[in-house]
Image (cartoon, rainbow, N blue to C red):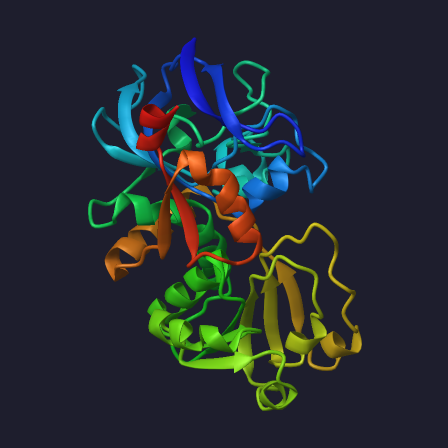
């Protein structure tokens, strides 16, 4: 077995703390990676605190992983030692169902294996994530990282990037379209950047007037303060697509009425408690669509990484040491980060 060191939570009320554990030795199809950087996702906090009521403790979070390949199995042909590689939210799937066959592993009909807090097929134990010094992953779920991308700032692309890219791509966002992004957090700021790069007219919706300048800097063409009824009224029936990234329950009708006939609003934020149910009339009278989207398949994630390399897109990050992760969680709850924490895993070696 491979000895590993990470940070784990042992209960919903306890802070993350140093934790030693074992991973499987690389098999013939596996890639072993020394983790250099790992993004801090809101899903990490939800899981650590058991807000989705499915956490198995101890849990080592982290699914925005950038690292250096240190070892490959005998049958691996896509990676070699020394390369920079990425691992996102999945490390396995059934590889046999209709969704997997279409490159949509995130919708695996058996259920994909999460990078952490998932059942590992090889050992029957739990998967442990990127708040650690290494990881072993089947090469099918390992991603190439362009040398044009800053490794630390690229880490959040593995979750926040693909979570926003996939729906924008699926609903064919592009030139000539008016697109709304709701919320300017870890997901929202990526949505603004990517939609702008796709050529859309981008409108950022926020409750915080002080985020206007940042939104414009990131690529928004307009900023609407969603608490201002007059500003919202001016936007009615004008959007082709709205990407709603907010992870807290809120009134969906306020945004549904902004869609044109046959427009779509897609939800990617996952609140711990449900949104209030929308008014059906706001959907049926304009044949509007309310949809959801979950990360992206491996092929699409690679496509997203290549798109971001081509357009010079990375996340706006604050680099932290692993010893500061509990403080980072509290700050994240207050939206006190612009716009994604990333852990420098070198601190795990030197500070633990």
- In front: 349, or 204? 349
Spot occupied by residue 278 in the image (x, y as percentages of width and height)? 76, 69
Q: Which residue shows up at 63% across the image and 79% down it?
A: 227
In the displayed structure, would residue 267 be above or below residue 85? below
Q: Is residue 236 visible?
A: yes
Spot occupied by residue 251 in the image (x, y as percentages of width and height)? 71, 70
Quadrant in the picture for the N terminus: top left
Q: Which residue shows up at 56% across the image and 57% down it?
A: 334
Q: Is residue 33 visible?
A: no
Quadrant housing residue 2 = top left
In the displayed structure, would residue 311 be above or below residue 24? below
Spot occupied by residue 92 in the image (x, y as percentages of width and height)? 50, 29
Q: Which residue shows up at 43% across the image and 63% down it?
A: 189
In the displayed structure, would residue 126 be above or below residue 62? above
From the viewer's perspective, tell me whether residue 324 is left or right of residue 75: right
Quadrant housing residue 27 = top left
Q: Which residue shows up at 31% across the image and 44% down it?
A: 152
Quadrant in the picture for the C terminus: top left
């Amino acid at each position: 077995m491979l000895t590993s060191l990470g940070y784990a939570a042992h209960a919903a009320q306890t802070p993350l703390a140093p934790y030693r554990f074992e991973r499987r030795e690389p098999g013939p199809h596996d890639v072993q990676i020394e983790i250099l950087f790992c993004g801090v996702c809101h899903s990490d906090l939800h899981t650590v605190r058991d807000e989705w009521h499915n956490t198995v403790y101890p849990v080592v979070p982290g699914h925005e992983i950038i690292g250096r390949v240190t070892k490959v199995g005998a049958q691996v042909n896509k990676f070699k030692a020394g390369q920079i590689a990425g691992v996102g939210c999945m490390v396995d799937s059934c590889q046999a169902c209709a969704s997997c066959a279409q490159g949509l592993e995130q919708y695996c009909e058996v259920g994909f294996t999460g990078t952490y807090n998932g059942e590992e097929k090889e050992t029957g134990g739990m998967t442990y994530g990127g708040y650690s010094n290494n990881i072993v992953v089947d090469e099918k779920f390992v991603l190439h990282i362009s040398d044009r991308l800053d490794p630390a700032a690229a880490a959040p692309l593995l979750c926040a990037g693909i979570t926003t890219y996939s729906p924008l791509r699926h609903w064919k966002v592009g030139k000539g379209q008016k697109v709304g992004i709701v919320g300017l957090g870890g997901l929202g700021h990526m949505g603004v950047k990517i939609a702008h790069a796709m050529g859309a007219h981008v409108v950022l919706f926020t409750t915080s007037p002080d985020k206007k300048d940042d939104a414009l800097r990131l690529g928004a063409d307009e900023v609407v303060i969603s608490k201002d009824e007059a500003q919202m009224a001016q936007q009615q029936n004008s959007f082709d697509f709205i990407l709603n990234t907010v992870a807290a329950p809120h009134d969906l009708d306020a945004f549904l009425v902004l869609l044109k006939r046959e427009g779509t609003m897609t939800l990617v934020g996952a609140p711990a408690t449900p949104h209030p149910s929308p008014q059906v009339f706001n959907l049926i009278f304009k044949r509007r669509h309310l949809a959801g989207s979950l990360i992206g398949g491996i092929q699409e994630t690679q496509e997203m990484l290549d798109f971001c390399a081509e357009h010079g897109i990375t996340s706006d990050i604050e680099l932290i040491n692993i010893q500061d992760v509990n403080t980072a969680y509290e700050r994240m709850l207050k939206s006190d980060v612009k716009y994604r924490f990333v852990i420098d895993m070198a601190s795990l070696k030197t500070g633990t």
